[in-house]
Amino acid sequence: MIKDEITPIKENADKGFNYTVTDEQIKEHQKRSVLEIFEWLEEPNKFIYAIQTPEERERAKKAKKF
């Protein structure tokens, strides 16, 4: 059953992530073409979609509306 509100998964409570980007990494990224950037973004999206359950996809759709 899909709820009208987004509810975090309890197992993910108090979890997060962070990372550091160096100036060199930023400069390398800036050298990419728009097409390369879109391709770079599309690959993980395809992977995530492939492993998501229908419920997770619905939760993601609702989160995008905010």
Image (spheres, rainbow, N blue to C red):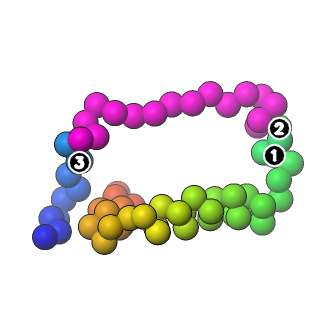
Task: Label 3, secondary structure: give it.
Answer: loop
Q: Point out residue 35 in the picture as x, y percentages from the top left corner.
A: 78, 66
Q: Point out residue 51 in the picture as x, y percentages from the top left corner.
A: 42, 64
Q: Relative to residue 46, is residue 32 drawn left or right?
A: right
> Could you tell me how far apart the alpha carbons at marks 1 and 2 are, in whole angstroms?
5 Å
Residue 66 at least partly seen: yes
Query: What is the chief secondary structure element of the magenta stretch?
Result: loop
Q: Nearer the viewer, residue 46 or 66?
A: 46
Task: Locate the N terminus by quadrant.
Answer: bottom left
Q: Are marks 1 and 2 in contact (CB under 8 Å)?
A: yes
Residue that protrudes farthest toward the front in the picture: 51
Residue with the mark numbered 2: 27
Give the crowd class for mark 3: few <14, some 14-19, many >=20 residues within 10 Å: few
Of the numbered discs 3 and 2, the one sitting upstream in the chain is 3
The mark lying in front, picked from 3 and 2, is 3
As shown in the figure, which amino acid type bears the numbered disc 1?
Gln
Residue that protrudes farthest toward the right in the picture: 31
Q: Nearer the viewer, residue 24 or 52?
A: 52
> Could you tell me how far apart the alpha carbons at marks 3 and 2 are, in whole angstroms?
37 Å
* Position above or below: 32 against 20: below
Task: Label 1, secondary structure: give it.
Answer: helix
As shown in the figure, which amino acid type bears the numbered disc 2?
Lys
> Measuring 20% from the left and 52% from the top, which residue is drawn there?
7
Residue with the mark numbered 1: 30
Residue with the mark numbered 3: 9
> Measuring 39% from the left and 34% from the top, which residue is drawn there?
16
Numbered marks: total: 3
